[in-house]
Amino acid sequence: MKIRLLTIALAFFAITSMNSCNNTSNTADSVLENIYNRKSVRQFTSEPVSEEHIQTMLKAAMAAPSAVNYQPWRFVVVTERTELDAMAEVLPYAQMLKQAPLAIVVCGETTWFDGNENPYWQQDCSAATQNLLLAAETLGLGAVWTGVYPDPERSSKLSALLQLPGNVQPLCAIPIGHHDGTPQPKDKWKPENIHYGKW
């Protein structure tokens, strides 16, 4: 009887372990698939993006790494049609804002704790931007990174439009929405761009 119970217990443990490994493998596959499937979407329907989805994307963005964990990112969420159209007027390469129901402007606080310049804010905010784009992909939304910084004209005009404080710089504007059509990801794998040890 004891042997039988032990056999059952071991079988249960083995099945549980296999399921755990399969779940881990499935999760890893899902994460990688999401990264590979991310694409730049420039055509949107008029359907609004839910507040829940907006919060999910922002939470993902804020999970990014940052120098000394300073987390310099700041976000401006724009959903009003007049404001989106006004942004399109000052960002020549973001004309899809005239169609998108949402834009999230990723900004960075350019100064450290002590008021000196933070030389890493662009890197930190870029990491946050990538997280945001991947979250949008996971949620079935379309998004595209449109550059603002370091173009001085775009930066100054958008800063004025959004009434940003002096120590906050816009890095990029991300139009987001439900994609119109069936956009496909690009295969960007190029082994020739990889060097091991030395160039």
Image: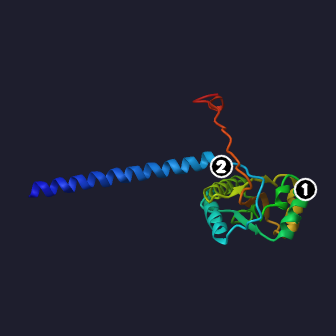
Coordinates of residue 57 in the picture (x, y in percent): 64, 63
Which x, y percent locates residue 69? 61, 60
Which residue corresponds to the image point at 87% horizontal and 64% vertical from the top-left?
85
Residue furthest left as drawn: 1
- How many marks are shown on the rendered structure? 2
Spatial distance from mark 1 to mark 2, Cα to Cα? 29 Å
Can you say which quadrant of the picture contains the N terminus? bottom left
Q: Nearer the viewer, residue 131 or 107?
A: 131
Regarding residue 164, the answer to whether it shows in the image is yes
Check disc 2: other Cα within 10 Å, few if <14, some if 14-19, many if 20+. Answer: many
Q: Disc 2 marks which amino acid?
A: Arg
Does the image show residue 109? no
Residue indicated by mark 1: 153
Q: Position of residue 31 (x, y in %)?
A: 54, 51
Q: As rendered, which of 93 and 151 lies closer to the eye?
A: 93
Instruction: Identify the mark nearer the N-term, 1 or 2.
Output: 2
Q: Which is nearer the eye, 26 or 78?
A: 26
Q: Is disc 1 placed on a helix, strand or loop? A: helix
Q: Are marks 1 and 2 in contact (CB under 8 Å)?
A: no
Query: Is residue 152 toward the left or the right of residue 178 in the image?
Result: right
| Vertical side of 179 occupied by 75: above or below | below
Quadrant position of residue 9: bottom left
Q: Secondary structure at mark 2?
A: loop
Q: Residue tagged by mark 2?
A: 38
